[in-house]
Amino acid sequence: MRKRNKHVSVWLTEQEHRHLREQAELSGLGIDPFIRKLIMGVELRPRPPDVYAALLRELSAIGNNVNQLAHRANGRGEAERDEIDEAARLVRQAWRLVKESL
């Protein structure tokens, strides 16, 4: 048995249909799931570019490295110059990645 057993048909102008297709595409959804989400009151936003997922992975790895450096520095009660330089390099790398993705 079908989960969705009710069908709705609606007539649209060419302009309305084009707008519907564009909005669904921007959200990363097909037309049917897009309309279902609208009906349920879900706030739909444009799908983020694919580069954002890679950027988030990189930023997460950089944050992990900075945390490891901070943990070692806290354990000794001080940070060595090369650790500070490495943390600064990682922050610059994160900033570069963000600027490149915009």
Image: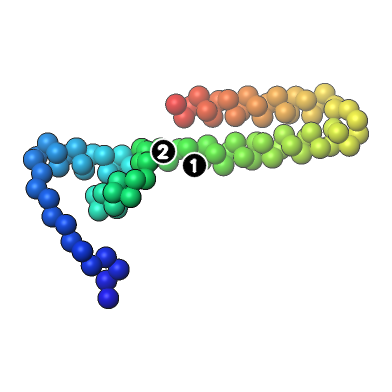
In the picture of the structure, the residue carrying the numbered disc 2 is 48
| Quadrant into which the C terminus falls | top left
Q: Residue at x 23, y 39 (%)?
A: 22
> Which is nearer the N-term, disc 1 or disc 2?
2
Helix, strand, or loop for circle 2? Answer: loop
Mark 1 surroundings within 10 Å by alpha-carbon count, few (fewer than 14), some (14 through 19), many (20 or more): few
Q: Is residue 28 among what the camera can see?
A: no
**Image x and y of residue 73, in percent:** 85, 32
Corner quadrant of residue 14: top left
Q: Name the residue under label 1.
A: 53
Point out the image quarter for the N terminus.
bottom left
Q: Residue 69 carries which label?
A: none
Check the image and report above or below for 59 versus 37: above
Front-most of 69 and 42?
42
Residue sitting at 75 percent across and 24 percent down?
Answer: 85
Q: Position of residue 48 (x, y in %)?
A: 41, 38
Decide: marks 1, 2 in contact (CB < 8 A)?
yes
